[in-house]
Amino acid sequence: MINSLLTRSHRLFALNAAVSLGVFGVLVSPAPAVFAQSAPVFSQMIVFGDSLSDDGNIAHQMRDTFFFSYPSSNFDYSNYRFTDDLYTSPGSSLYSGVWHEQLATSFLNLAVARNSLDGGMDYAFGGATTRDGQTERTIINNPFPFSGGNFTITIDNIGKQVADYLGSNTPDPNVLYLLWGGGNDLFDDSSATNVTATANRVRTLVDRLALAGARKFFVPNVPPLGAVPNSLGHPSTVAALDLASANYRGELNAALASEQSALAAQGINIQLYGLDIWLNVIRVLAEPAKYGFTNVTDPSQGESVNPDHYLFWDDLHPTTAAHHEIAMEADRVLRGAVPPLGKAVNISTRGKVGTGEDVLIAGFIITGTDAKRVIVRALGPSLSNFGVPGPLADPTLTIYDSNNAVVARNDNWRDTQQAEIEATGLAPQNNLESAIIVTLGPGAYTAIVSGKNGGTGNALAEVYDLNTTAQSVFANVSTRGFVGTGDDVLIGGFIIASGEPPLIVLRAIGPSLSSHGVAQPLQDPNIELHDQNGALIGSNDNWRDAQPTSIKATLLAPADTRESVIVASLVAGNYTAIVRGNNGTTGVALVEVYRLE
């Protein structure tokens, strides 16, 4: 978890905004593969899962029990699948089949896994959880996923699916085993206890297959379940499901990593491929046009629309266009064509430095396993060379850790580490400016820029990564300062290095700062995001007006609806976030930049 960093007086205070970190694999990018590789050769695919992977088992069970097929064309579904096709209303003109069928035919040149009740190797059942045994589920007209409907049938949970397969087959090390569940577990029970139990059940399923001889596994996590149309309109349900989905992501990563290590200790080496559905469905929700979608919140079933431009077919299941996105990114993962996420290698903030609570306070969070060598700078006089009016004449810099202990302080950069600073090529232009080189372990830090002897003016606080190869990154930067009018805005800058475009969340916080002791918060902030050429990428005034579903899914929704947020996937480059007050209002604000991993 990471916490947004602010200040208590001249020290630290924290907002209780947090987001789970950790990545098992990467799904969905609008960019083509960064480098082309061939996918490993698999003899076939064997599928275990729920309705996202079911291509006929529920329909077969319905025929056996009630003598008609569902899902089917009679109910405006692709025959035997919970999605659309050419013959549904409306019909897809581009895609056919669920994600693993499209992966097999369009990318891997493998035979499609047909439903197991008809003799195939797709054991998935709509409504299945990761548990053992069977479950009674209601089908058709469900007010909630697989409950409260009109017809009850018995379905196989994923534990039973695996047991049935192992009961009549010997696993093949050349087969790719697709294991995707967890969504129904969390729909049924979104408690923290069940999140942990679900992750551990998936680990157990991998263990059972691996001990029997399976070696290659494809295991996605779940999307932010509060974002499906069935959940929307129920705020408490959305919040609970989004929290459970985010936490499941982290716990599944940990459980699978532990399982892989435990098996290796027994001499069993498995290959785990993962799709980070959670992170990258948020990408699509935030910027649908990048992925060819015009609607990511409403069902397209029965509407006069093009389903190839919709994310959802019904109020729970994706369109075949969305299934195609999953298949396409699954192929990228299998080919090893998804590079690591681009790191934030430099962060900076420009703002007005006053006195009292109006000093410039920059917070940053380092996540990972390694300590990171950084240089922190406080610039003032040299800003006049760039046309900044009223620069701070003599800035001072103090770095605090999360316990409010002073890590280092500096007034004039030549006074302490001159040779070391000059060696980095980042020495300030003016002797009155401040700089500190320090090695920091993972954690939260605050850099406070104030004027010597009570001086005031515009200043720039910067943090540079001097060791970009370390297994640690800047995950968050947040700066608190006074927002005035004209040039006295609050400006946050950051640089994204090469790699898979990371998902960035920008926030402008104002009114809610009053609950943290800020006497004069900015009452109505707005935020803009610009690229290195100054072009506007996006802007927001009130966060609920533009990207509310994706913002809630990140668990970073502000406490006050007047506060502003932008969610965007950003390619390598320089970026600037600008915070202003609406209608010329002024006050203390916080600008934050989160890099989700």
Image (cartoon, rainbow, N blue to C red):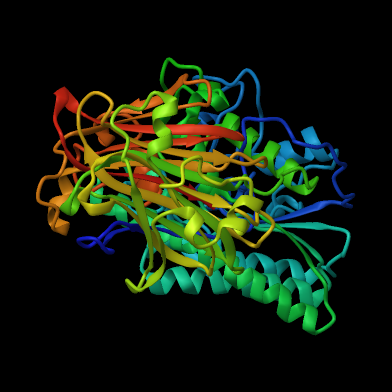
Which of the 4 quarters of the picture holds residue 194? bottom left
Q: Position of residue 522 (x, y in %)?
A: 16, 39
Q: Position of residue 339 (x, y in %)?
A: 71, 46
Measuring 42% from the left and 15% from the top, which residue is drawn there? Answer: 304
Placement of 568 over or under 474, stated as above or below: above
Q: Position of residue 520 (x, y in %)?
A: 11, 45
Q: Position of residue 22 (x, y in %)?
A: 55, 60
Hey, which residue is sitting farthest bottom in the picture? 266
Placement of 250 over or under 119, stated as above or below: below
Can residue 149 be seen in the rendering of this structure?
no
Which of the 4 quarters of the picture holds residue 245? bottom left
Measuring 28% from the left and 26% from the top, which residue is drawn there? Answer: 487
Measuring 69% from the left and 70% from the top, which residue is drawn there? Answer: 206
Q: Is residue 126 left or right of residue 434?
A: right
Question: Quadrant of the image for the N terminus?
Answer: bottom left
Placement of 287 over or under 376, stated as above or below: above
Hey, which residue is sitting farthest top in the picture? 304
Q: Is residue 116 left or right of residue 302?
A: right
